Amino acid sequence: MSRTPVVGGNFKCNGTVKFIQEHAEVLKKIENNGVEVFVCPTALHSSLLQSLMAGSHVEVAAQNMYFQKPGAWTGELAGELLVDAGIKTTLIGHSERRRIMGESNEESAKKAKRALELGLKVVFCIGETLAEREANQVDAVNFAQLEALRLITVEADWKNIVVAYEPVWSIGTGVVASPAQAQTVHESLRKWFAEKVSAKVAQEIRIQYGGSVNAKNCAELSSCKDIDGFLVGGASLKPEFLDIVKILGDTKKKM
């Protein structure tokens, strides 16, 4: 089963108007080499980057959304607002939302379900902490995060979901999961889908790896059969983001 590779760039809480204008010129150089590409600027910069990237191969996505309809939710972004702004994809459940902002598995799942109901595509982030890995709880943690979403979705929903596996201990630390470590988790996730959802979804669902991905380490990770792309943090703010997209596309074409 051939799955389309996908690379996302998460700008997190970074960027200025000047940076967005300059970085857009870099992003416009990304060619269509069989890889889907999206970037997630701050909400303040989304409209600007959308206008600058019009007609390019790069989609502008959101970093987060709320599960309620528009209303008295100060500081939040309802999915309807994303749709109205022309956003088609959103990250949900990033580890910084879960670990720092206290977002529960159930809340992340509710956000994803609401996004799907509104016709948005979801990049659903999961991952374990170092303490959880050392306690041999990798599968238990990741499966619990997925299970919360499985319980409120149907099989057809998963065609609009990309899973982003990001070991929390690797995000922004410079410590990257080895290809063997990453592949082991991705393979386990695919087996979970086969057992809990369906063999079809297990074959078709795209699973990204995230965690200090850069142009130097992405080739070896790209060669893993169950890694379908990357969710990139810091490197997405640099020109090397182009190299990551190219390397992934070139590697997958040879497999």
Image (cartoon, rainbow, N blue to C red):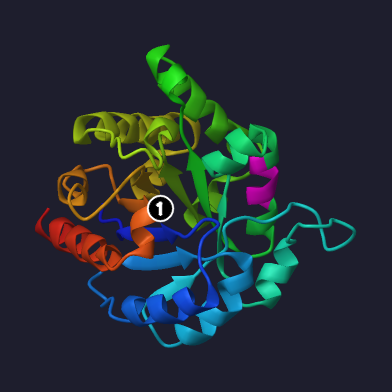
- Residue 118's quadrant in the figure? bottom right
91 vs 174, left or right, is: right
Question: In the picture, residue 149 is in which quadrant?
Answer: top right
Looking at the image, which residue is at 75% across and 61% down?
78
Asked where in the image residue 254 lies, by quadrant, the reply is bottom left
Q: For the magenta stretch, what is the residue range?
A: 108-113
Residue at the far right in the pictured view: 72
Disc 1: which residue:
233
Foreground residue among 245 and 255? 245
Where is residue 163? Give x, y as percent: 45, 46
Q: Is residue 136 above or below residue 74?
A: above
Q: Is residue 112 magenta?
A: yes
* Count of picture labels: 1
> In the image, what residue occupies the spot 73% across and 53% down?
66
Can you give x and y, in whole percent of width and height, for residue 55 in the image? 42, 88
Instruction: Give the residue type that dot 1 points to.
Output: Gly
Q: Is residue 200 above or below residue 63?
A: above
Residue 156 in magenta stretch:
no
Q: Residue furthest top?
A: 135
Left or right of 176? Residue 161 is right
- Relative vertical location of residue 79 with respect to residue 150 in this rendering, above or below: below
Majority SS type along the magenta span? helix
Q: Is residue 166 above or below residue 58?
A: above
Secondary structure under tag 1 reads: loop
Residue shown at the point (48%, 20%) measured from the top left: 140
Q: Nearer the viewer, residue 36 or 39?
A: 39
